Image: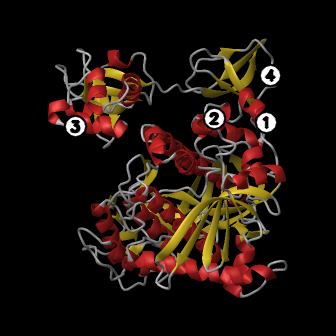
């Protein structure tokens, strides 16, 4: 209904209507229209005028933005395009950083005026228990001390309610490794515990699937494929198994965990799932979207246990085209829990790990089929960039070693089977005119892409330089440095030129996948979008397509916002946790020399990426420095030398800040001479 309301208000003759007029023109119930318009108003899509009539916000002078209080400019509002306007102090007196507002862009004083506050961003904070005289207090930087009525061990970290100054939860002692993880999670508004009501509901959820329940499901249309040879392929540390795969009767089988049976609407479990929206993974830690009884238990496709799933069967021809497919509720029994590491031993090295003898044929066929899909997608514009994920090796809580995670054939197999499964799902939704949460990816920043291709020229690659690089040209340019030491750095720069993928209620295509319509449903245990898409499918199957449309279409804008917010916050948490663990590890090697690749340049220093994927800043001695217009070359004007992003340089680790997760180096290698005119010398670039 939301789309119908927006479409109606888009029309010039209908751009100023009351609730009753909207309901009459759409032939809908007034109360339903009122509820939907209220939601659209809260989201800043429509605006209620003084006369009680509604208009699309985009048809007014109002703009939606986020409040930010700065020390230099004072209070400002930042808009989606990153432009900003000053706010008068009186308009932000009772607001917080992060509040979402509608503003009148200009008033008589030349500043923006807040017209409506759409949402408040309450920022609770973490403090540490100290003792001052006879008083126990909670102290936190830039916060007023809070005197405690109870005694807590000194050094305990507490989560404090910003408004009431009450204790929300005890995180643990500051020296406990888990406490820092909790501190970062709450900083980015992720819950670190489940409510009592949630836990009470959880007790009603069974830990296994009984034969009686299976027979009941079969009578309702669920298909029993427990005798099929399906396996899971995951990382060695994985505990939540979303998907099982196999090859039977000339068809690829992908079975996805059915979470809809236990996460039911109008329950505390449902509310908490929406509140979390994503599982957050740190080194050796996870804050799950669903309780471990669900994520690691009844919904996880653990080996040799009967589980409810949603199965897709797909037939692929030799050109990677989808010949036919089917989607149906199912019951499976995972024959074996295999790992990427062991599967790669077979797929890459031809070594059959003990216990894998019965699955090698399926692995061969599945890999060949998934590569047909990949090859077809590459021809149609799929962008294939490297993953710089780090693998941590622990002894208790101590990091013993870290290195770039190997992305082998097994990982590649699963990646493209999941993409194939998602493509089939979207095709089903589109053909049945069903709403779904799309995974959209806009066109890249072509100016930045052009600069990236020019950087490759700086590095002596014969790259294609164009104002609007095509996907084929992007992949050609990437192929030039495929086996070089600077691959990760150059890939990272190219990825930054691409748009951020986002969830949306309306599908606009996925650029990096060849501009196909796209969405996801292969990880319903750990991603809200996948769970919601699965829920829509089951509602359509049980109650009909029209029911599913009317129910979910109005909800998808809000749910997409939840998924996007959670994903962005999770990325920040995971990066922060990774950087802290990297810093802890690197603190053992202060004074050690490394050869790394320059990933960024500035007049104050250069960023350097080490082979173990740790990155830090190398400070420069005092001098006169100049950065090229494209920000990829640093010139030392006095010495007549330069550093180009992608250069290999030798540095010494001098400082580690574990709390911030940062590293500092000093550079100990000579730069390349460029002479007065800035011309390159004959000295070869290292790593060529």
Q: In which quarter of the image is residue 253?
A: bottom right
Q: Mark 4 points at which residue?
A: 152
Query: Which comes sooner in the sequence, label 1 or label 3?
Result: 3
Q: In which quarter of the image is residue 153?
A: top right
Near mark 1 (Cα within 10 A), the count class, few <14, some 14-19 or many ≥20, is few
The first of marks 2 and 3 along the sequence is 3
How far across and down, in percent of the image, does residue 417 sit?
A: 57, 70
Name the image colouring: secondary structure
Q: Do the residues labelled 2 and 3 touch (CB within 8 Å)?
A: no
Q: Residue 272 carries which label?
A: 2
The correct choice, above or below, for 185 with respect to 144 in the image is below
Q: Distance between the residues labelled 3 and 4?
A: 58 Å
| Mark 3, secondary structure of its residue | helix
- Dot 3 crowding, Cα within 10 Å, few <14, some 14–19, many 20+: some
Name which quarter of the figure residue 627 lies in. Answer: bottom left
Q: Name the residue under label 1.
A: 204
Instruction: Give the Cα distance between marks 2 and 4.
Output: 29 Å
Look at discs 3 and 4 and give the one toward the viewer: 3
Q: Position of residue 90 (x, y in %)?
A: 33, 15
Q: Is residue 374 above or below residue 170?
A: below
State whether residue 345 appears in this view. yes
Question: For the residue labelled by badge 1, is the local secondary structure a helix, a strand or a loop?
Answer: loop
- Would you name the residue on which mark 3 appears? 10
So how many labels did they put on this image? Answer: 4
**How far separated are the C-alphas under marks 2 and 3?**
35 Å
* Nearest-to-viewer mark from 1 and 2: 1
The mark that comes first in sequence, 4 or 1, is 4
Give the secondary structure at mark 4: loop
Return the disc, 3 or 4, that comes first in the chain's sequence: 3
C-alpha distance separating marks 1 and 3:
48 Å
């Amino acid at each position: 209904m939301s789309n119908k309301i927006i479409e109606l208000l888009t029309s010039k003759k209908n751009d100023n209507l009351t609730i009753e007029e909207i309901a009459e023109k759409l032939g809908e119930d007034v109360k339903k229209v009122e509820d939907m318009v209220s939601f659209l108003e809260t989201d800043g899509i429509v605006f209620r005028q003084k006369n009680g009539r509604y208009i699309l916000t985009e048809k007014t002078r109002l703009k939606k933005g986020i409040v930010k209080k700065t020390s230099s400019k004072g209070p400002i509002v930042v808009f989606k395009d990153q432009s900003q306007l000053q706010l008068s102090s009186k308009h932000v007196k009772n607001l917080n950083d992060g509040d979402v507002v509608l503003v009148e862009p200009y008033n008589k004083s030349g500043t923006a005026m807040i017209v409506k506050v759409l949402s408040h961003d309450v920022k609770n904070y973490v403090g540490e228990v100290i003792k001052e005289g006879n008083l126990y207090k909670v102290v936190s930087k830039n916060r007023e001390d809070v005197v405690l009525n109870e005694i807590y061990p000194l050094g305990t970290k507490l989560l404090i309610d910003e408004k009431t100054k009450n204790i929300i939860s005890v995180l643990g002692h500051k020296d406990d490794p888990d406490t820092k993880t909790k501190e970062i999670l709450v900083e980015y508004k992720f819950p670190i515990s489940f409510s009592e009501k949630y836990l009470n509901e959880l007790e009603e959820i069974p830990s296994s699937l009984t034969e009686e329940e299976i027979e009941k499901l079969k009578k309702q249309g669920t298909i029993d494929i427990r005798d099929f040879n399906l396996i899971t392929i995951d990382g060695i540390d994985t505990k939540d198994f979303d998907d099982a795969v196999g090859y039977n009767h000339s068809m690829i089988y992908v079975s996805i965990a059915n979470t809809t049976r236990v996460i039911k609407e109008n329950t505390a479990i449902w509310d908490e799932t929406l509140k979390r929206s994503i599982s957050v993974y740190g080194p050796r830690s996870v804050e799950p979207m669903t309780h471990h009884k669900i994520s690691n238990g009844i919904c996880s496709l653990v080996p040799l246990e009967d589980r409810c799933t949603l199965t897709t069967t797909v037939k692929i021809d030799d050109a990677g085209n989808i010949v036919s497919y089917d989607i149906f509720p199912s019951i499976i029994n995972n024959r074996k829990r295999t790992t990427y590491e062991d599967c790669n031993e077979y797929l890459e090295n031809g070594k059959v790990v003990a216990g894998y003898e019965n699955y090698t044929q399926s692995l061969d066929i599945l890999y060949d089929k998934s590569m047909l899909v990949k090859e077809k997608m590459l021809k149609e514009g799929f962008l294939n960039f490297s993953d710089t994920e780090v693998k941590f090796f622990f002894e208790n809580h101590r990091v013993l070693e870290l290195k770039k995670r190997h992305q082998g054939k097994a990982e590649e197999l699963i990646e493209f089977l999941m993409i194939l499964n998602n493509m089939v799902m979207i095709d089903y939704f589109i053909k049945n005119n069903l709403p779904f949460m799309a995974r959209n990816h806009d066109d890249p920043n072509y100016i930045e892409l052009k600069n990236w291709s020019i950087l490759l020229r700086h590095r002596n690659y014969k790259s294609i330089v164009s104002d609007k690089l095509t996907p084929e040209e992007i992949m050609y340019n990437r192929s030039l440095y495929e086996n070089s030491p600077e691959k990760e750095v150059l890939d990272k720069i190219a990825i930054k030129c691409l748009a951020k993928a986002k969830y949306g209620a309306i599908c606009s295509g996925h650029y990096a996948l060849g501009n196909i319509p796209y969405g996801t449903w292969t990880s319903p245990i750990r991603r809200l979008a996948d769970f919601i898409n699965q829920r829509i499918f089951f509602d359509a199957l049980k109650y009909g397509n029209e029911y599913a449309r009317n129910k979910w279409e109005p909800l998808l804008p809000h749910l997409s916002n939840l998924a996007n917010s959670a994903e962005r916050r999770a990325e920040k948490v995971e990066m922060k946790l990774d950087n802290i663990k990297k810093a802890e590890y690197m603190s053992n090697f202060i004074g050690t020399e490394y050869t790394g690749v320059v990933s960024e340049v500035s007049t104050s220093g250069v960023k350097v990426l080490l082979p173990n994927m740790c990155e830090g800043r190398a400070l420069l001695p005092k001098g006169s420095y100049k950065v090229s217009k494209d920000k990829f070359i640093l010139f030392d004007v006095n010495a007549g030398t330069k550093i180009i992003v992608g250069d290999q340089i030798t540095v010494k680790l001098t400082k580690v800040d574990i709390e911030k997760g940062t590293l500092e180096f000093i550079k100990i290698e000579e730069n390349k001479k460029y002479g007065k005119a800035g011309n390159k010398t004959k000295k070869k670039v290292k790593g060529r």
